[in-house]
Image (tube, helix red, strand yellow):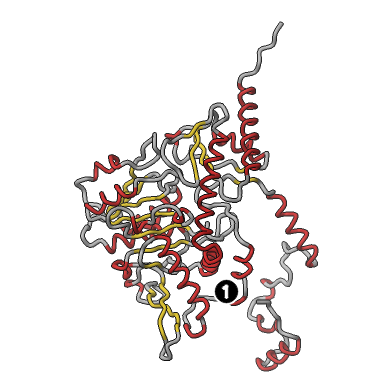
Amino acid sequence: MPFIPHTEEETAAMLAAIGVDRIEDLFDEIPSALRTRTPPEVPEALSEMEVGNLLNARARQDGQPLCFLGAGAYDHHIPAAVWEIATRGEFYTAYTPYQAEASQGTLQLLYEFQSMMTALTGLEVSNASLYDGASALAEAVLMAVRANRAVRARRVLMPKTLHPRYRETVRTLVHPQQIELVEIDFDLQGGHTPLEALAPWKDQPITALILPQPNFFGVLEEVDVLTDWAHEKKALVIGVVNPISLALLKPPGDWGKKGADIACGEAQPLGMPLASGGPYAGFLCCRQALVRQLPGRIVGRTLDLEGNPGFTLTLQAREQHIRRSKATSNICTNQGLLVTAATIYLALLGAEGLERVARVCHANTRRLGELLCEIDGIAPRFNRPIFHEQVLRLPAPAGEILRALAAHGILGGYDLSADYPELGSALLICATERRTEAEMQTYAAKLARVIAARTQARCPVEPKY
């Protein structure tokens, strides 16, 4: 919606009604020594063409590197229609739909988002989004502690195969509430959390178990076995999932004999561009029995007195709506615009389209891994099935190799050395549906050249006399 300023006649009429001659008279309480008409650091005004040229030049400084980096934010194709619709005035400027009769379009869209997320996760209830995937997991942990009245230990098991930034965020948000987070080691050969790793807690009370699927390494966890182990101990299971993967993998609601109790994750793969770290949107779903502990808001569908369908906010357990002491959360921001894009993206692709995206992502990642492993010194780090991402062992420090690749316009992956030093020189790679065979061949050729050049630099040929 364009911004239309007031005309000079309208401004004069308003000033006359107030009883002042100039707009500056409205600020006469500010001492003149503190007032300046033009801040010195603000440059002279530019024309529209000049501003466009300036911004384009700055954008070009970032370049357009080939992206083989995942680690929680993915370079997926976004159909043009997604943001053409999402940025229409009725969506782009819509605020919280407190007044249902004036917000039916926004409410219906949020209801559709909830319906899609329950279909993907196999659970019965979804809220209308959260701030991001990491804070959604923190909310899931708080929710599990509130809901699990059978266990009062306030102890949550958190595998090290979970995204490192998610672990940091959860720790930051739940630590002040005296919740014990126990990190569980992973198998160095498989890159997964084996059942044996939970043995020390066999006879200890556990409130909840977090299960990423796929995990941060792209490895598939044994979710059925781990879910049943947790339920036997009366613990709740929190699934952390990639929504694209749910087009192919078993949904959390079907894990084990009873299914996970809560599922959450990051909705960025669903039509949200890579934009220097966000903004993104988190999703959170659960079983019907836990709905009263679900943070955020829920949109419901009903019928009016004439039998016409309508939408309204049916659950608002935020501190903005009820007493702070009774609220489930006070940080569960609803990312309305991003959810709008995600809903449009899912509606455009449908179930078949989403499955195609997932299959191509998986095929491309496998193909990229095969190409890179043809290079001497590179091999898969783990021996278990993967989805969408893979960890490779490198013959040189990953950081050095990534810097060299960046000079060639390639974002080669994520260096795991800082978060997982036990893996040695290891690189997490990803290839979405956007990557072509030619681009993957280019990456492999550049990587081979970088490794060869580094080897020659370290082992120079001795001169012959």
Q: Quadrant of the C terminus?
A: top right
Element at label 1 = helix
Question: How many other residues sit within 10 Å of disc 1, few (<14), some (14-19) or many (≥20)?
Answer: some
Which residue lies at the image location 59% right of the left edge and 41% below the top edge? 412
Q: Quadrant of the N terminus?
A: bottom right
Which residue lies at the image location 47% right of the left edge and 32% below the top edge? 424
Q: Is residue 180 visible?
A: no
Left or right, residue 243 beside residue 146 = right
Residue 180's spot in the image, x, y percent?
30, 52
Left or right, residue 297 beside residue 53 = left
Nearer to the camera, 294 or 76: 76
Q: Is residue 273 visible?
A: yes
Which residue lies at the image location 31% right of the left edge and 57% below the top edge? 259
Please identify the quarter of the rendering in which residue 401 is found: top right
**Amino acid type shown at disc 1:** Phe
Which residue of the protein is positioned furthest toward the top in this rendering?
Answer: 465
Please identify the quarter of the rendering in which residue 4 is found: bottom right
Residue 135's spot in the image, x, y percent?
43, 59
Residue 59's spot in the image, x, y percent?
70, 54
**On the image, numbered disc 1 is attached to which residue?**
91
Which residue lies at the image location 59% right of the left edge and 77% below the top edge? 90
Residue 251's spot in the image, x, y percent?
39, 56
Give the vertical position of 309 relative to 231 (above or below).
below
Give the vertical position of 411 relative to 257 (above or below).
above
